Image (cartoon, rainbow, N blue to C red):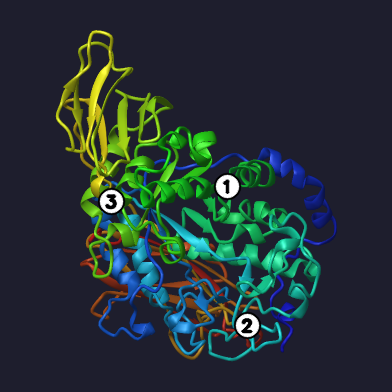
Amino acid sequence: MIDQRRLYSPAKRGGFASAFRALTLGAVLLAAAPISQAGVLLQGFYWDVPSPAAGTSSAPWWWDHLGAQANALKLSGFSAVWIPPVLKGAAGGYSDGYDPFDDYDIGSKSQMGTIPTRYGTREQLEKCCAMLRANSLSIYCDIVDNHRDGDPGNYQFSYVDAYGNSGLGRFGKSFYDFHPNVGQDPDVPAGSAEDFNAFGRDLAPINGPSHWIYNNLEYAGDWLTKALDLQGYRLDDVKGISTDWLNPFLSYGTLSGKFAVGEYYDSNLSSVEYWIQTMMGGRSSAFDFPLRQDLYNMCNNPGSFNMAVLDHDGVQGTDPYHAVTFVENHDTDRSSPIVQNKALAYAYILTSEGYPSVFYKDYSTDSGCYGMKPTIDNLIWIHENLASGSTVQRWKNNLVFVYERQGGQHLLVGLNNNIGYGYNLTCATGFGAYVHLHDYTGHAADIWTDGSGNASLSLPTATGGMGYVCYAPIGISGSFTAPQISTTQEYDGTSDLDLKPADNTAQVQVCRVYSAASKSISGALTFDTTSWTSSTYITLEIDNPSGGVVSTKNYYSTTAQGSTLAITSSAAGYYTYKIRSYNTPSGNAKPSYGLKVTYTAPQS
């Protein structure tokens, strides 16, 4: 295998820098500012979504299917979408993304038997992200940095370059870049119990030689963030990743300051809390697996689960600022699904504290999905308009849990887990005396508080999980809007990545961006002028959806780096940037470049 370290070695942080990092890591942990997020998150995929690349020729490409729903998702009240892993996987077009192969192939290289991933091409992915951003939705990408898959059995990873040449792609990996070929990294939560072969070749960012893995995972994460204009990350399998690397990773380059949530797959509350607060210094949130275990027990065991357990349950009960609550995800749906009364669990997470995540397969009306959209849409409205502030419990026993959110005009929530009977009770509230309350779920009639501010509730039976009510003062209304915003996506043309550099013999296509009509499209170009003469230049061109040239610009060694070629789109569609070099010296015949394109996609 070609030694990739000779091909690409940007500014290593060795010597004093590495020593300084080690000395200051404790300070980083203490100083890391907690980054949370308001709103409702959609997990925008499920396991084995149908795909033309995986044998279902009639299925739409997932990136196209998800992007087409962006406007409807925003108008239903979602604030962010968690997209699946985008890297080419070892299983090629059949991969769900959790067997990542090449850190710089997002559906853009011919490897593992395919150019597109299961979800589509790089261009389709960029269009999807642009449409999500056009609807003001944040994008959280699933980052799988515990392992890599697809080597021929010898821990040797090599990749094709922009021209399809084997072994010349960026960030190859070798035997000693992986555990157990080097010792386990420090501060891996799983410690000696980690199964190095559980998911693939286990990366060694700390103990691998020369910080090769450490540094290059940072570079790749920064590249991906800029390529897709990401706002955050879902971190896969954090129990197997050293926090000595993960914490600085989340502070590197464009990753700094963005939302992160870790998959610490454990129902032990103290273990999850220790990872959040002590190991990560509050830099990342975590999925609330302890709460999900109780929701699983509640739904699958109606009448026998002790509902009092839900009082400040899980991470959302102790540290709601760092809790991402969920009912189901792509893993639990296969291994330990909630098989009945799931609506009651969604009623809990969408009226409680924490940052709730909705599972696409539960929500969607697509064929093969569970079609809970009407129920969940109502609960999202309640979450966004009524549920705020701290929580106080108002009534609890083995069958019923009633709690009140203290923010705004207050929200009183009653949950009944008895599928055979309703439940009547009277409890204190913070609404005040003689207040007219409306159940915003439509499950029960309006009520009035009494002279002491107490409320008498008649909770419906739990049949189908519908044993819940959500009371607040009558007359509250509101709808969701979708402000249209632009996106900025970056393209690097260089031989060891997926896009070709500028060529002195032919025009090269940089990208196609999908713009709405009458919107600005602006490309800022940076370029390598090494050994250029006064007659050397690069020409950048932009074509309209019909293929006609709209505008061109020449870039000389004297042209300011980052100078833009901008137009206003005449119609919705794909606009193409193309590049060519002229009179380039033999030592730099094909100059590398970066193009930063800012544009606004259609909302639907």
Residue density around tag 2, few if under 14, some if 14–19, many if 20 or more, within 10 Å: some
Q: Disc 2 marks which residue? A: 588
Amino acid identity at mark 2: Asn
**Vertical comparison of 213 with 324: above or below:** below
Q: Secondary structure at mark 1?
A: loop
- Counting from the top left corner in percent of width and height, residue 425 is at 28, 24
Q: Residue at x 34, y 72 (%)?
A: 62
Nearer to us in this view, 211 or 490? 211
Amino acid identity at mark 1: Ser
The disc, 1 or 3, on the residue closer to the chain's N-terminal end is: 3
Q: Secondary structure at mark 2?
A: helix
**Vertical comparison of 402 with 455: above or below:** below
- Counting from the top left corner in percent of width and height, residue 208 is at 77, 69
**Which of the numbered marks, if any, corresponds to residue 284?**
1
Q: Disc 3 marks which residue? A: 74
| C-alpha span from label 1 to label 2 | 43 Å
Q: Residue at x 51, y 87 (%)?
A: 112
